Image (cartoon, grey):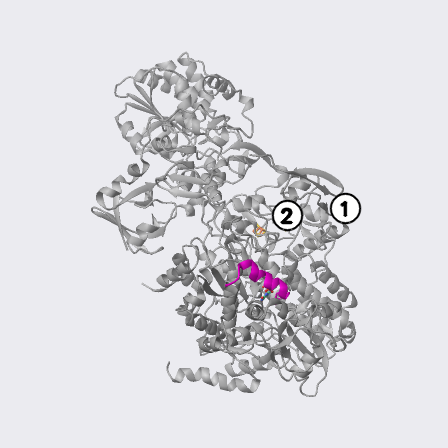
């Protein structure tokens, strides 16, 4: 494969309505409106599009779960997940900033498919830039009833909480509550926003809908590989020359993504490891990157595309510190609802710190894995599980480095690690500190 | 209704049949198996699956599942910690995580010995600790109100308390702040948890994090006894346990009657018991010894004086009853007066139309109603607090609730007006009486005799009950009478008006029955001995002097009145969870009153708003004698309907002027949802000299 | 009378009746106006939303973007999650600390700038991301810091 990306989502980037329409924008909407909602959904099923938010659920099937209004007389809602907070992911930022009208067109087509007139876009509070662009684009549609139809799109801003990317926490937050996940079932398709049938989709998923309708589901399904159809906007970051977003055809090799698109490792360093799909995915060593960037190939390595945030780490990265930093993230972002996540993530950080500082013995490495085990699979939502899974994967793949910390009584990098002494928000009480008296 | 579909579930190799959709915790219980829980509490709404104590293995599901969030489906195969090592490990993990921060200060914790965390750790927990880091510690205990202390270290963040505040009481006062491991339970800043039901959180808390300040360090679980009885402070008659130690009431707990209170209790019922030990409690018969002074009498002398006075009054004796008497007390007193003196004149607490018996229904049915009309001047919560919780539950379940006149027939009507109660078209009618046992007292009075009152100015006035003695109308009559005999608990109530006072007993000190607002006859039991003889004991002696046979035993008095009023059921049959008598035959209504015109006529006349000066729940003699309840008294506010506020450009929370010709007051405006347009409400103590029609200005 | 109350009524009108959805936008609006959410501001918001201040605080304290303590005139937020950290975010933080003479989590003595570290801002490929008054600066290096601080302080000379 070459490094020419396959653009269907990011194609013809423009924030201007006139330019977007000139390039054929909103034609897919007209096409979709000429179809029945069921036909649109069928087109999506044919396309084999799967959700780009991380869980990879077939989009058309998700839409088909919404009960018809004659069986459940309640309004339907479309809620778009633009909370993008997964460390390593910034693709939705780019999509909203560069092709806002394609995204809006996707919202309108989806609204038609699920028979809804109320769309909420839940955008993370930090995204002021994309927010303004999106609101500007919607403003352009103010007098375009022909495009908007009966649909109202409300952009609702979050306020800083990673957990609000989890769909039920997002709904709680959108309902004006603390963003804590709900226990499922009931699933949002049956009882979501305001206890009504709700489809929650990721920004990229929605922005992929117009090209699917335009080219036809079957044509879309020719892109990519078995099980992972179409394109993906991947975010490349970390120790690479050309960090940024690239739209690729699914199945491209991870090595090519890193070296061809990302331009390889800068400063003459060497590759050590790759986080393939955002912080919550199992790490890959430098020897594991000759793998197709698609669901099945990555699943063989027990990892996944997640939200397609590829974090490249060079040889200066201390893996114990990597564990600490991500664990601190999960500890900071744990919503506090379920016990294993709330207490477990904090405990993991504490053990990892002890290891890093050289204060831990061999048995504490076992304890670390045991605590991972005790968190994993017991939490209310995947947040806590993720921390346990990734930390366990660091130990599994870099055990020697953990042991070296114990044997050398400290960090073998001796202060030269790229993650040395990073100040994580969890260690810093700027936000309504709790009076904590030392024990 | 069709009978529910039965499904078969296998739990730890035992099969059990339950209705489809039954919660797994209940399903397991039906199979005799415990699924341990912390956060699960069905009364708080849908399960939240937060604590993860209830993890079980379900065949066909790869991950452990929170048992509390599962419901029974046919053919389900479930394994709990008893038969699944994976589930056992899951529960053990949860406990280990919980204990990571728990102080394990059980020896000095009030919950010790009746603590779910203690019990479950004993059964499922890890034997040692692997946590080698400092536990989180906090300042402790934090008074979240004068009634409740919070030990944050002990909190396991099950969110029962905050869910209660948010989705049962709907008071929005007790919340979790911050996120993740930083989360703590808190009120706003240093403000106390104000609300009618705050005390329930002390019972909901599965650890010793939220405790009652009254009960702190007062007793250990093995030193106490719980006496099942019924609260006597409002017409709901919530079922309670009075916890006693060494002959003293130490706390009041709810005792779930699913049809009456669902295990909730208001703060008056829970905390006001300390009135038993009030400083001005009457412990001996009293005689007026000066304008504001009494002297104690011995009993023989007192009975002589009362006898003498009653003979002087004869048939021109007037009796006023407060509605806080037990049925038996009222009946015995009525017999003495009506049969002994032919004194048939009485001011009864209130009139409850008999027609209502045709619309009788358990309070729990309110939750199932789809349409409800509330026609009540007094806020429901101030008069019959737990009824308000049923209304809220109904609204959460989707009921349409109208305030003011309903259009058309409704499933349920809640009203404080007997006339309206008898006139609105409704399937079930809930009348909110003023007094705890007005209905029972009225029945007792009428059962005791059938003579007609004579139409003369009363020479002797008998005032039964403190509330009655404090009533300005009664006081006005008292100034006209030659002799005033009082019966009550507190000296202050009778000072300045009574010539003779005989000691009364509190509902916690007596045996007897009461009738609540549903028409349910319930049994009160003596939790502690009163510092004075039983009312029936001295009434029996007085009766003897007038040739009226009165038994000192309430059971005997009850059998007598039961034959006349309650279909002859026996005292023993009024069980600890009393049932509701069947509905009376429906008598077709002759006339339908227009409630709208009834209630709104005043406002129409002046263009102003009709003022309701209501008596708050947190008032009255018992509350006045409970210092820790004082903060719950209403803070000067005027409640308005949204439409009235909008029309006057009044903002919620704004200070407004309420005026009626000549007087004006500044109060905080609050937009109230439970108010019909055209009406405003102010607590009676805050209403000053305002008239019945007021104007409100921003 | 403040117009915040009326603005909040307008926000409420966007969402279904009886929903609390207006809470986040209302808090955001209040914070824009007052800089941070003091107890009095929370009371004001609660009145306008017809809810309790405790509820508002429960919600506000869940989210990182709400300030429950006063902050400086400007807010500098440095992402220190992994993608930024491996290319020098910590050096950027330290450069800010030394320029501003305060620690992360604090406000400079002149009350001008509050500095804090934050979790991933969603700009990882353009690291280090620094949000200055909520607008992202990309590819920030420690060397760029004095200029940014100058710019924020210079604001003072312009007298606003
Ligand atoms: C902790 C957590 C965080 C998540 N964050 C996001 C997110 O920021 N954006 C997103 O689209 N999906 C996120 N998800 C996935 C959503 O729950 C949900 O699956 C997704 O929005 C569905 O959209 P899709 O089917 O289009 O992928 C997150 C899930 C979890 C468990
Ligand atoms: S205080 Fe008690 S009831 Fe409230 S969350 Fe903590 S443990 Fe649960
Ligand atoms: S009891 Fe089931 S999760 Fe708490």
Determine crowd level at label 2: few under 14, some 14-19, many 20+ residues with C-alpha closer than 10 A: many
Mark 1 → mark 2, Cα distance in angstroms: 18 Å
Quadrant of the image containing the C terminus of chain A: bottom right
Q: Nearer the viewer, residue B197 or B310?
A: B197
Determine crowd level at label 1: few under 14, some 14-19, many 20+ residues with C-alpha closer than 10 A: some
Seen in the picture, residue B48 relative to A390 is either above or below; the reply is above
Visible residue check, residue C127: no
Q: Nearer the viewer, residue B288 or B63?
A: B63
Residue lying at 63% horizontally and 60% vertically, measured from the top left: A342
Mark drawn on residue B13: none
> What's the magenta region?
A34-53
- Residue identifier under label 1: B83
Q: Nearer the viewer, residue A76 or A263?
A: A76
Q: Earlier in the sequence, mark 1 or mark 2?
A: 2
In terms of secondary structure, where does tag 1 sit? loop
In terms of secondary structure, where does tag 2 sit? helix
- The quarter holding residue B353 reads top left
Percent coordinates x, y for residue A56 in the rendering: 64, 64
Disc 2: residue Cβ within 8 A of ligand 3's nearest atom? yes
- Residue identifier under label 2: B68
């Amino acid at each position: 494969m070459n490094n020419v990306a396959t653009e269907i989502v990011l194609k013809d980037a423009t924030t201007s309505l006139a330019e977007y329409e000139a390039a054929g924008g909103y034609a897919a909407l007209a096409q979709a409106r000429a179809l029945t909602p069921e036909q649109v959904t069928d087109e999506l099923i044919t396309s084999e599009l799967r959700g780009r938010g991380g869980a990879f659920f077939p989009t058309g099937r998700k839409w088909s779960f919404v009960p018809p209004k004659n069986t459940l007389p309640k309004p339907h809602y479309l809620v778009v997940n633009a909370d993008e907070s997964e460390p390593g992911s910034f693709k939705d930022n780019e999509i909203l900033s560069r092709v806002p009208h394609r995204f809006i067109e996707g919202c309108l087509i989806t609204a038609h498919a699920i028979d809804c007139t109320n769309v909420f876009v839940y955008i993370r509070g930090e995204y002021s830039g994309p927010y303004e662009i999106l609101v500007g684009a919607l403003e352009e549609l103010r007098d375009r009833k022909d495009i908007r139809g009966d649909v109202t799109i409300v952009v609702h801003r979050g306020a800083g909480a990673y957990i609000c990317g989890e769909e039920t926490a997002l709904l709680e937050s959108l309902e004006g509550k603390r963003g804590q996940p709900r226990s499922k079932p009931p699933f949002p398709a049956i009882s979501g926003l305001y206890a009504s049938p709700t489809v929650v989709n990721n920004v990229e998923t929605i922005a992929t809908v117009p090209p699917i309708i335009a080219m036809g589901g079957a044509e879309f399904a020719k892109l990519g590989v078995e099980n992972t159809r179409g394109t993906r906007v991947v975010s490349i970051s970390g120790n690479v020359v050309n960090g940024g977003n690239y739209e690729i055809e699914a199945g491209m090799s991870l090595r090519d993504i890193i070296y061809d698109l990302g331009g390889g490792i800068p400063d003459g360093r060497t590759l050590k490891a790759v986080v393939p799909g955002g912080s919550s995915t199992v790490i890959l060593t430098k020897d594991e990157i000759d793998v197709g960037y698609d669901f099945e190939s990555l699943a063989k390595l027990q990892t996944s595309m997640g939200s397609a945030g590829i974090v490249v780490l060079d040889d200066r990265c201390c893996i114990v510190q990597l564990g600490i930093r991500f664990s601190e993230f999960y500890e900071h972002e744990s919503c506090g609802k379920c016990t294993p996540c709330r207490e477990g993530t904090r405990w993991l950080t504490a053990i990892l710190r002890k290891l890093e500082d050289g204060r831990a013995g061999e048995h504490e490495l076992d304890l670390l894995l045991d605590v991972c085990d005790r968190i994993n699979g017991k939490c209310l939502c995947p947040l806590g599980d993720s921390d346990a899974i990734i930390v366990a994967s660091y130990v599994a793949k870099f055990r020697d480095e953990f042991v070296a910390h114990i044997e050398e009584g400290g960090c073998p990098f001796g202060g030269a690690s790229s993650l040395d002494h990073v100040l994580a928000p969890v260690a810093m009480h700027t936000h309504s500190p709790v009076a904590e008296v030392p024990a | 209704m069709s009978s529910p579909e039965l499904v078969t579930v296998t739990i730890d190799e035992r099969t059990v049949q339950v209705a489809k959709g039954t919660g797994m915790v209940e399903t397991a219980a039906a199979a005799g198996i415990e699924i341990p829980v912390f956060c699960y509490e069905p009364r708080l709404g849908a399960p939240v699956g937060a604590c993860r104590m209830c993890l079980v293995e379900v065949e066909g599901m790869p991950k452990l599942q929170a048992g509390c969030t599962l419901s029974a489906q046919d053919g389900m195969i479930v394994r709990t910690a008893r038969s699944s090592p994976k589930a056992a490990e899951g529960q053990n993990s949860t406990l280990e995580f919980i204990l990571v921060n728990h102080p394990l200060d059980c020896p000095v914790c009030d919950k010790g010995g009746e603590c779910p965390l203690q019990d479950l750790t004993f059964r499922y927990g890890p034997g040692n600790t692997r946590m080698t880091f400092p536990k989180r510690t906090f300042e402790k205990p934090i008074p979240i109100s004068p009634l409740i202390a919070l030990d944050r270290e002990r909190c396991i963040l099950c969110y029962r308390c905050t869910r209660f505040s948010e989705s049962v009481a709907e008071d929005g006062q007790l919340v979790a702040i911050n996120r993740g491991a930083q989360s703590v339970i808190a009120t706003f800043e240093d403000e106390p948890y104000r609300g009618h039901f705050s005390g329930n959180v002390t019972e909901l808390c599965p650890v010793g994090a939220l405790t009652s300040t009254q009960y702190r360090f007062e007793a250990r679980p093995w030193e106490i006894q719980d006496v099942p009885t019924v609260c006597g402070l409002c017409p709901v008659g919530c079922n309670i346990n009075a916890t006693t130690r060494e002959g003293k009431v130490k706390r009041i707990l709810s005792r779930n009657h699913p049809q009456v209170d669902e295990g909730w209790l208001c703060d008056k019922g829970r905390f006001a018991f300390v009135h038993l030990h009030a400083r001005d409690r009457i412990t001996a018969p009293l005689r007026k010894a000066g304008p504001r002074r009494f002297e104690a009498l011995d009993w023989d002398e007192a009975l002589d004086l009362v006898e003498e006075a009653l003979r002087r009054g004869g048939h021109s004796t007037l009796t006023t009853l407060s509605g806080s008497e037990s049925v038996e007390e009222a009946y015995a007193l009525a017999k003495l007066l009506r049969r002994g003196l032919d004194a048939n004149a009485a001011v009864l607490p209130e009139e409850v139309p008999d027609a209502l018996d045709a619309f009788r229904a358990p309070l729990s049915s309110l939750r199932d109603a789809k349409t409800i009309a509330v026609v009540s001047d007094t806020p429901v919560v101030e008069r019959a607090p737990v009824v308000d919780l049923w209304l809220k539950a109904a609204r959460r379940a989707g009921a349409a609730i109208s305030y003011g006149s309903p259009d058309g027939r409704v499933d349920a009507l809640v009203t404080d007006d007997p006339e309206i109660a008898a006139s609105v078209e409704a399937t079930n009618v809930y009348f909110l009486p003023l007094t705890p046992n007005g209905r029972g007292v009225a029945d007792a009075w009428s059962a005791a005799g059938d003579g007609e009152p004579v139409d003369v100015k009363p020479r002797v006035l008998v005032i039964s009950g403190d509330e009655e003695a404090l009533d300005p109308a009664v006081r006005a009559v008292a100034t006209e009478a030659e002799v005033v005999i009082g019966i009550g608990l507190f000296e202050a109530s009778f000072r300045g008006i009574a010539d003779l006072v005989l000691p009364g007993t509190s509902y916690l000190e007596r045996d007897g029955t009461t009738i609540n607002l549903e028409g349910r006859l319930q049994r009160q039991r003596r939790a502690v001995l009163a510092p004075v003889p039983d009312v029936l004991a001295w009434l029996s002696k007085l009766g003897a002097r007038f040739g009226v046979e009165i038994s000192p035993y309430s059971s005997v008095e009850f059998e007598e009145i039961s034959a006349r009023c309650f279909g002859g059921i026996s005292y023993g049959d009024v069980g600890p969870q009393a049932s509701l008598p069947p509905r009376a035959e429906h008598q077709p209504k002759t006339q339908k009153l227009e409630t709208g015109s009834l209630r709104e006529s005043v406002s129409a006349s002046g263009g102003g708003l009709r003022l309701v000066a209501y008596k708050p729940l947190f008032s009255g003699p018992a509350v006045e004698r409970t210092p820790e309840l004082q903060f719950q008294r209403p803070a000067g506010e005027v409640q308005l309907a949204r439409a009235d506020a909008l029309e006057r450009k009044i903002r919620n929370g704004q200070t407004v002027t309420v005026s009626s010709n000549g007087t004006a007051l500044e109060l905080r405006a609050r937009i109230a949802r439970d108010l019909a347009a055209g009406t405003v409400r102010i607590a009676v103590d805050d209403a000053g000299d305002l008239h019945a029609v007021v104007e409100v200005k921003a | 009378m403040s117009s915040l109350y009326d603005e909040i009524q307008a926000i409420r009108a966007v969402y279904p009746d009886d929903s609390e959805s207006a809470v986040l936008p209302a808090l955001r609006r209040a914070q824009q106006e007052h800089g941070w959410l003091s107890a009095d501001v929370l009371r004001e918001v609660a009145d306008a939303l017809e809810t309790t201040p405790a509820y508002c605080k429960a919600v506000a304290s869940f989210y990182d973007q709400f300030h429950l303590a006063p902050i400086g005139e400007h807010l500098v937020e440095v992402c220190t999650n992994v993608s930024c950290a491996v290319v020098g975010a910590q050096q950027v933080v330290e450069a800010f600390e030394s320029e501003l003479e305060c620690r992360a989590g604090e406000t400079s003595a002149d009350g001008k700038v509050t500095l804090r570290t934050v979790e991933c801002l969603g700009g990882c490929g353009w690291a280090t991301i620094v949000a200055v008054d909520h607008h992202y600066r990309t590819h920030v290096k420690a060397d760029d810091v004095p200029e940014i601080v100058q710019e924020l302080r210079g604001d003072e000379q312009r007298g606003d």
